[in-house]
Amino acid sequence: MIIERAKMGKFTINGQTFNIDGNNICIRDGVVTVDGNKITEVDQVKIQWEGDLASLETDQSVSCGDVDGDVKAGGSVNCDSVGGSVDANGSANCDSVKGDVKAGGSVSCDSVGGNITAGGSVISGK
């Protein structure tokens, strides 16, 4: 998982809160790093982010607030507003997306500025 931040924020991993003053948070194989510096190791990852994100990429499902750029997930995506595009192997559920939405499952978004490609049903106010 790679998170590029737009502003200083904090995130919680498995109940432990971190205040972040770095540009990139990466979670791969249970190792959490910020700007290349290891901060912790975890067996299972449950992340809660507070603050806006520049972009988000993960090999898992993701639930987040606003994202200025793109969201790419190996599972499902459940986000508020997305300034870029959404690419999910599972379903996508978002408030508004300025770019395209591509999902292996269903898509449910209030509005989409680009194209929608879905392996399941589509609900959009596009």
Image (cartoon, rainbow, N blue to C red):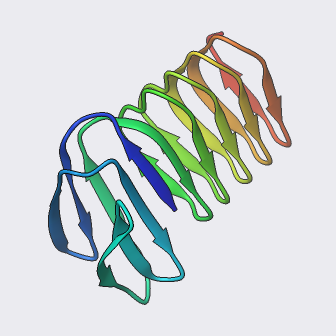
Q: State the residue in front, 42 or 48.
A: 42
For image coordinates 69% across by 41% down, the residue present is 87
Position of residue 76 in the picture relative to residue 104 (left or right): left
Tally the marks.
0
Q: Quadrant of the C terminus?
A: top right
Q: Quadrant of residue 97?
A: top right
| Residue 84: x %, y % from top left | 57, 24
In the rendered image, which quarter is residue 125 located in? top right
Q: Which residue is rendered at x = 63% and y = 40% of the image?
A: 92
Q: Measured from the top left, where is residue 31 in percent x and y?
A: 42, 81
Considering depth in this image, is 39 or 124 the residue closer to the camera? 39
Looking at the picture, tell me which residue is in the foreground, 48 or 68: 68
Residue plotted at (30% across, 35% down): 52
Determine whether 45 is above or below 120 in the image. Answer: below
Q: Position of residue 35 (x, y in %)?
A: 35, 60
Residue at the limit of the structure toward the bottom, as seen here? 43
Quadrant in the picture for residue 109:
top right
Image height check: is 4 above or below 40? above
Left or right of 49: which side holds 124? Answer: right
4 over 54 or under it: above or below: below
